[in-house]
Amino acid sequence: MIPSWTIKPCKKGDTINSKKITFPFDITDCIITMQFKVSANAKTVFEWSTVNNTFEKISSTEIIMKSRILDVVPFTYLSDLQVKFNNGEVQTYLNAYLTITNEYTV
């Protein structure tokens, strides 16, 4: 069973704090991506990835999900954390949910 991760909710336009993610396997040559969407087949609204350096590898088994401002439409976004190995294998490590709520102070 793939574990679920509910990321702490934040308000539209606020900064989501960095998070450390530890894997039980070596990720040295892997591409790691989380694409957040409103539904499984929808267009990607925002993402974290080792390709664009929004995920930073800090060891052979750990990454940092870098902090960033999420100025997107309030919604509960769905994602999964996908690991692509250099041999072509792909594994889904976890499912993730992130709720962005309305801001009241502008």
Image: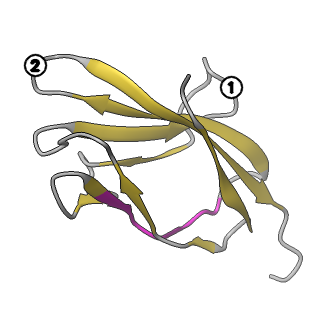
Residue range in magenta is 63-71
From the viewer's perspective, is residue 93 above or below residue 17? above
Quick one: SS at disc 2?
A: loop
Q: Position of residue 96 (x, y in %)?
A: 60, 41
Instruction: Of the two numbered discs 2 and 1 on the same chain, state the one appearing first in sequence.
Output: 1
Nearer to me, 10 or 42:
10
Instruction: Using residue 105 as the reference point, say whether residue 30 is left or right of it.
Output: left
Q: Which amino acid lies under the numbered mark 1 shown in the image of this protein?
A: Ser
Residue 25 is one of the magenta-drawn residues = no
Above or below residue 74? Residue 95 is: above
Give the image quarter of residue 29. Answer: top left
Residue carrying label 1: 39
Query: Image point 60% across, 17% down: which residue?
Result: 41
What is the crowding at mark 2: few (fewer than 14 residues within 10 Å), some, or many (at least 20)?
few
Q: Residue at x 56, y 28 (%)?
A: 43
The quadrant the N terminus occupies is top right
Q: Quadrant of the C terminus?
A: bottom right
The image quadrant that residue 89 belongs to is: top left
What residue type is disc 2 on? Answer: Asn
Nearest to the observer: residue 30 or residue 72: 30
Which disc is residue 17 wearing? none
Q: Could you say where residue 35 lies in the image, as x and y percent from the top left?
A: 48, 37
Residue 87 disc label: 2
Between the residue at mark 2 and the residue at mark 1, the CA separation in whole angstroms equals: 29 Å
Where does the image place residue 47, in percent across and percent down from the top left? 46, 46
Q: Residue at x 85, y 63 (%)?
A: 102
Name the residue nearer the viewer: 54 or 83: 83
Q: Position of residue 86 (x, y in %)?
A: 11, 26
State the count of labels.
2
Q: Give the foreground label among 2 and 1.
A: 2
